[in-house]
Amino acid sequence: MSVCYRHTDREAYIRCQRCDRTICPDCMEPAAVGFQCPSCVAEGRKTTRSGRTAYGGLRSANPSLTSLALVVTNVAVWFAVLATGGGNSRLVDLLGLRPTGICFVAGDNQRFWPAATAETCDRSPFLGDWYPGVADGAWWQLVTSMFLHVEIWHIGFNMLALWILGPQLEAAIGRARFLALYAGAGLAGSATVYWLSGTGSITAGASGSIFGLLGALLVVAFKVRGNVQPILFWVGLNVIITITGRDFISWQGHLGGFVGGLALMALYVWAPRARRTTWQLAGGGVFALVVLGALVARTLALA
């Protein structure tokens, strides 16, 4: 009489499709073909590829999709700026990051009244057009400036870098964490611009997020003990370009984005394996509170 190998007191006639041992109805686990025993099912779960990345995120079926969506969004905003006047477009002044508001001469956003305020801009003797800054309540500029470009070389360089770096990082950490990294680095760059740029200046571009991705890739390379020299070369080259062109390149945004990317990716890759997601969420919350605190502090200082 055939008996179940796990329950020797039970008669059985079905064999496990994997180990070929006899199993009773209580031990039969449905498989793609026939049945398997509980031991083989458990072993199969161990050897089956996980649906998560090495750092806890869900694997993206197409790691390029998020980067493509970000590129399309940036290009769409760029076309909107071109269609409404390019550098003279009102969108530039509405979407760009300006720490404090500015009163332009009516109909001319190239000249402004330095002494005018939000209350006096539209009155004599100014009779100008007031454009608010972050300190005046235009908080959206901290985000919209990350998608705003005017010059073709600016958007071309940023989108090329995004297309190269983005899919690699999304494949490593998953889509949700990649989006958090991109947004967090961009906001860190905006906060640094808010603190260190001239109050009447305007800043635009995805460079803060791009530098954050570059810093994140450097962290991953260190974590896996890969060859960091090519990444360090590109970091150094971009630092030289930033310093050389500091009159028209936002070194503040580059610095803040790079540091933000380093911090967030370090949190992702060195979070303890036990309860990794909890640690990452908690760390991300602390990061967000630090950025928010910096923004509030700067607003109070400019009040």
Image (cartoon, rainbow, N blue to C red):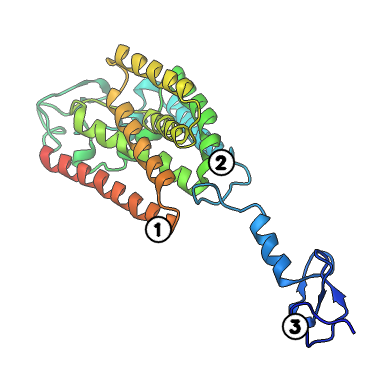
Q: Which class describes the residues within 10 Å of circle 2: few (<14), some (14-19), or many (20+)?
A: many
Q: Which of marks 1 and 2 is nearer the N terminus?
A: 2
Q: Please identify, in this view, whether the residue under mark 3 or under mark 2 is nearer the observer.
A: 3
User: Which residue is tagged 2?
Assistant: 171
Q: Do the residues labelled 3 and 1 touch (CB within 8 Å)?
A: no
| Quarter holding residue 206 | top left
Q: Is mark 3 on a helix, strand or loop?
A: loop
Q: Where in the figure is residue 20, as x and y percent of width and height?
A: 84, 67
| Quarter holding residue 113 | top left
User: Which residue is tagged 3?
Assistant: 7
Q: In which quarter of the image is the N terminus?
A: bottom right
Q: Quadrant of the C terminus?
A: top left
Q: Where in the figure is residue 112, as x and y percent of width and height?
A: 19, 22
The amino acid on which the numbered mark 2 sits, given as a three-letter code, is Ala
Q: Where in the figure is residue 8, as x and y percent of width and height?
A: 78, 83
Q: Which residue is drawn at 46% across and 47% down?
A: 177
Q: What's the CA distance linking mark 3 and mark 2?
A: 45 Å
Q: Which residue is drawn at 52% across and 24% down?
A: 160
Q: Determine whether 55 is above or below 159 in the image.
A: below
Q: Determine whether 10 is above or below 247 in the image.
A: below
- Say which mark, if any, is on residue 218: none
User: Which residue is tagged 1?
Assistant: 278
Q: Earlier in the sequence, mark 3 or mark 1?
A: 3
Q: What element carries label 2?
A: helix
The amino acid on which the numbered mark 1 sits, given as a three-letter code, is Thr
